[in-house]
């Protein structure tokens, strides 16, 4: 008996190529992003222990060990979280996550981002978002960001990248309003040329 193997149909090949990669290794000039692993709990927890990081965030318990442990377990389980590493001293300075990939809408959400206050001020957050956006736009047409309405610092940072507020929604667990920011591949390409 002879077994005949058929070549995959074109639609299957395209589908495989467009599957979103949630935890790539990404490198920039000052920052590296790599997949989150269980051993990152303690160094990331030390960064998150600064209550001022969470000052405008609705879940301020993340600065406590117990609160951060719950956040970390969820981040690890998501399989979309990457730790941010300062390239020079090779230290963990925060993390961010890809989530809610919606293939029919050709979009993905970036969120759950925080950085050590020593790395605030633009360069690190900007490079982290640029690395993630460059990666995302290989797969999707639009990137979304959900930001708590009162988190002015995060809203300003996203607006600097060219994202625009297009909607709002209530976060079911926290009962707070999140603003929905969106950035298209075309808008992003325009900001990269500036």
Image: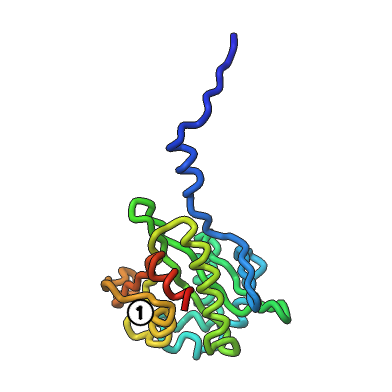
| Residue position marked by numbered label 1 in the rendering | 148
Instruction: Give residue 124's position: percent from left, percent from top.
Output: 57, 81
Residue 150 left/right relative to 19: left
Q: Examine the rendering and report whether any part of residue 42 can be seen.
A: no
Q: In front here: 171 or 64?
A: 171
Q: In front here: 172 or 29?
A: 29
At a point 52% along the width and 71% down the height, the residue shown is 96
Residue 38 left/right relative to 21: right
At a point 41% along the width and 61% down the height, the residue shown is 108
Extreme right residue here? 89
Q: In front here: 7 or 46?
A: 7
Q: Quadrant of the N terminus?
A: top right
Rendered position, 140 above or below 4: below
Q: Examine the rendering and report whether any part of residue 7 can be seen.
A: yes
Rendered position, 55 above or below 170: below
Extreme top residue here? 1
Quarter-wise, where is residue 173 in the image? bottom left
At a point 48% along the width and 49% down the height, the residue shown is 19
């Amino acid at each position: 008996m002879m077994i005949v193997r058929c070549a995959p149909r074109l639609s299957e090949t395209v589908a495989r190529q467009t599957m979103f990669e949630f935890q790539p290794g990404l490198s920039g000039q000052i920052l590296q992003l790599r997949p989150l692993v269980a051993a990152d709990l303690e160094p990331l927890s030390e960064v998150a222990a600064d209550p001022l990081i969470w000052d405008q965030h609705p879940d301020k318990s993340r600065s406590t060990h117990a609160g951060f442990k719950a956040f970390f377990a969820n981040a690890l389980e998501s399989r979309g979280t990457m730790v941010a590493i300062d390239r020079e001293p090779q230290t963990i300075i925060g993390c961010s996550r890809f989530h809610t990939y919606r293939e029919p809408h050709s979009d993905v959400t970036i969120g759950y981002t925080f950085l050590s206050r020593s790395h605030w001020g633009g360069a690190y957050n900007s490079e982290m978002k640029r690395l993630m956006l460059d990666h995302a736009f290989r797969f999707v047409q639009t990137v979304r960001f959900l930001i708590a309405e009162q988190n002015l610092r995060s809203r300003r940072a996203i607006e600097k990248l060219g994202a625009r507020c297009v909607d709002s929604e209530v976060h079911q667990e926290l009962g707070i309003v999140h603003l929905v920011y969106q950035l298209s591949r075309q808008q992003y390409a325009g900001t990269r040329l500036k």
